[in-house]
Image: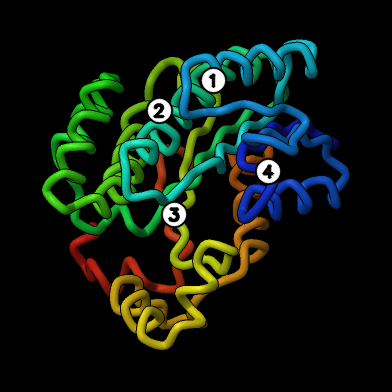
Amino acid sequence: MPRTYLVTGAASGIGNATADHLRAHGHTVIGADLKGGDISADLATPDGRAELVAAARELTGGRLDAVIACAGIARFDPLTVRVNHFGAVATLEGLRPLLAAGQSPRALVIGSIDAVHPTDAATVEAALAGDEEAAVAAAQAAVDRGEGHLAYSSSKAAISRWVRRSAVAAEWAGAGIPLNAVAPGVIRTPLTQPLLDDPEMRAVVEEAVPMPLRGPAAPDELTSLIAWLTSPENTLVTGQIVYADGGADAVLRGETGW
């Protein structure tokens, strides 16, 4: 049965591939992005997040069957935390009432294998406390001491922990709405391709994210998994961080994942 999806980050990368996949299977997809989507909204700002929710309500008549939060950035500064954590949380929480009015509602956010890498604890804890300005200040402090790279891993660790914490709550599981994350390894996008094309940088990437099963992937290799997790067929999987990473998590953490 055709469903109505909202996909953020739909103009490129995983979001674009997911939107294309869903449309090819007969579903209606509302694409949101900073620009170039059915909804243009800046998820780094409270106003932009409110605009997303208001526009989605208007376009759908107040009903969505699934939300897929793909929007994200990988800058070495606090903006990454604003978009990847607070933008994603605002998207999912803001659109939850529309999901409650939908059929077999489902929600998903894109995490990252980078969540298992070192993080800035102060940034993560402030994010999970819902204190955006404290999280931004902590991320900026990390930048100031030369650890700006921790902004990305911290943002993905925070959103992953938020999924684990929130998915079993009354507002999600209690309302019959599975909430999950998919954590990719290295995906070939305009952002990562220059690194993969440089032999020295590729060696750094492969050491950080070893993917023994086939190596770096294309965005469309994730779409069937995302589609299933947000389909009516998924009746039991919730609160999971599903690593679609070519084995990177198993290499990096071994048996300690359990």
Pinpoint residue 88: horizontal percent, then vertical percent.
47, 31
Q: Are marks 4 and 2 in contact (CB under 8 Å)?
A: no
Q: Residue at x 74, y 35 (%)?
A: 37
Q: Which mark is residue 10?
A: 4
Disc with the residue nearer the chain's start (1 vs 2): 1
Report which quarter residue 254 is drawn in. Answer: bottom left
Q: Is residue 132 positioned above or below 205 on the image? A: above
Q: Which mark is residue 86?
A: 2
Q: Which mark is residue 49?
A: 1
Q: Are marks 1 and 2 in contact (CB under 8 Å)?
A: yes
On-image quarter of the N terminus: top right
Q: Are marks 3 and 1 in contact (CB under 8 Å)?
A: no
Give the residue at the far front of this rendering: 144
Give how far apart the Cα atoms at labels 4 and 2 are: 18 Å
Pinpoint residue 255: horizontal percent, then vertical percent.
21, 67
Disc with the residue nearer the chain's start (4 vs 3): 4
Give the residue at the far bottom of this rendering: 199
Give how far apart the Cα atoms at labels 4 and 3 are: 17 Å
Instruction: Give the camera-side residue of 62 and 156.
Output: 156
Q: Residue at x 30, y 22 (%)?
A: 132
Q: Residue at x 59, y 64 (%)?
A: 190
Is disc 3 placed on a helix, strand or loop? strand
**Mark 1 is on which residue type?**
Arg
**Mark 2 is on which residue type?**
Phe
Q: Which residue lies under the disc numbered 3? A: 183
Disc with the residue nearer the chain's start (1 vs 4): 4
Dot 1 alpha-carbon crowd within 10 angstroms: few under 14, some 14 to 19, many 20 or more: many
